[in-house]
Image: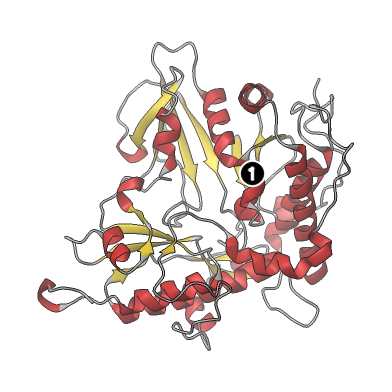
Amino acid sequence: MFNFCTCMSFKQEPCSDEERGKDSPVRKRDFKKGIHEIMCINNPPLRVSTSERGDYGDDRVINLDAGDPTMYETYWKKMGKKATMVIPGWRSMSYYSNGRSLCWFLEPDLCQQILRLHRVVGNAITEGRYIVVGNGSSQLILAALYALSSPESSEPTDVVSAVPYYSSYPSMCDYLKTALFKWGGDASKYEKEGSNYIEIVTSPNNPDGSLREPVVNRSGGKLLHDLAYYWPHYTSITAPADFDVALFTASKCTGHAGSRIGWALVKDPEIAMKMVKFIELNTIGVSKDSQLRAARMLSIVSDSCEQFGSTNVSDNRGESFYGFGHRLMTERWCRIRQAVKHGGMFTLPEFPTAYCTFLHQPTESRPAFAWLKCEDEEEDCAGLLRRHKILGRSGVSFGCSPQFVRVSMLDRDDNFDLLVQRISKITAAPNNSERH
C-alpha cells in the first residue's frame, strides 16, 4: 500500500478546524466596511517610480496580457544567499524519488515543504491526501481531466466552467482532440441531463477575482478545484480547502513561475494514480532540480511567516513573504481604483470583505488581475487599451463580451506605474467622439 506521500510523518499543527474557528470571532461576518479606503491613505495613484529598465521610454508598450509574477523579484532579491542553492552534479540523477510514494517522482523535500506551508497558512487540509506534483498547474489540469473522465462512455466527458472562465480551459480541453473529454462551455448554461461532466471551479476566479462554488450540481458530475490564487496576498483565507481534487501552483504561491512546479491534493488514490500515470506518459515525471528549488522557496516562505508572524506591516527586522505580498497588492489595488475613478472610462468589480484566519483581520480580496469593463458598450476594451500601448487579454477569451479586458496586476513596479498613469488618462469623451 502506498503512503499518502513521502513524508506523512511530518508533524502537523495540533489545532482542529473547530479550535481555529474559535480564534476568529470576527468571522461571524461582522466585517468592517471600506477597509480598502483606509489602506489607500498616503498612496497617491499617479506616482511613477524609477524604471529598472532604463533603455525603455515612457512611450513603450507594456504587455500585461499574461500573469507573469515579476513583482515578487523585489522580495527575493532581498533574500540573497538564503534563496540561492547549489545542486551537486551527482544529486537527483535517477528518475525515481522514493519507491514508497504513490507519486514516485515527488521529491521528499518538496513534499515536506508543501505540507508545512499549508499548515502555516491554513488554506488546505492535507491529512488523508495524496500529493501529485506536476509541471505547473497546467499539466495537473490535464492530468486531472484524464483521471476524472469516463473512458467507458460512448462520447467524451464534457468539461465546463462558469463564465468568465480561465481563457486556457477551452483550448486545453480540445487541443489534443481526445476521445476522453471535450470543452462543454459555460457551466451556468449546461443543460445535458443524465450525462457525465467535469466542472472546473476556480476560486478565487481568474479573471475577475470572484469567489466561486459549483453551479451545475447534478448527479454524474465531478469537480476539479483550481485554487492557484487561494493565498493570503490575494484573498482572505476563511477556511482550509477540503475538496476531492485541489490544485496549487508555485507561480502564484511564491512567484516562481519559471520553475514550472504545481501540486494537487487528491483524496482518492485511484484518481491520484491516474494523474501520476498521465504525467509519467507525458513527461516521465517532473524535474528534480525544479522541485528542489521550489522546496527551498516554500521553506523560506514558511520561515518568514513563523519568524515575522502573519502581519502585513513591515518593520526593521523584515516581513513575511505574504505580508509583503498583501501590502503591495493592497497598495496597487488602491492606486488602480483611483486611476479608474479619475479617468471615468472603466469600472472594476467590488469585492467582499472577510475575516482572514492567516492575517487575523478582515481583508478585502486583491486579485492578481484587474477585470476592467469599458462603460461604452460599443467599445472593444482590449483594442482601446492597445491604442494606449497597454496589452491586455480580451473578455472574449473568457467567454464574455469585448467590453471586458483582463490586465495583470503582478508586473514590475515600472510597468505597473505606467499602467496606472495611462488608465487615469483614458476618459469618456462626450457624444462618443474620439478619445484622447
Q: Quadrant of residue 435?
A: bottom left
Q: Is residue 211 left or right of residue 119?
A: left
Colour logic: secondary structure
Q: Secondary structure at mark 1?
A: loop
Residue 418: where, in percent of width, then height?
44, 74
Residue 6: where, in percent of width, then height?
83, 34
Q: Residue at (40%, 66%) from the top-left corner?
A: 61
Q: Is residue 259 left or right of residue 421?
A: right
Residue 367: where, in percent of width, then height?
50, 61
Q: Is residue 339 left or right of residue 23?
A: left
Q: Residue at (56%, 81%) from the top-left corner?
A: 50
Q: Dot 1, how many residues are within 10 Å of its Cα: few (below 14), some (14-19), or many (20+)?
A: many
Question: Which residue in the protein does label 1 denote?
Answer: 260
Where does the N terminus fall, quadrant-wise?
A: top right
Where does the C terminus fall, quadrant-wise?
A: bottom left
Q: Closer to the camera, 169 or 33?
A: 169
Q: Residue at (53%, 64%) from the top-left corner?
A: 411
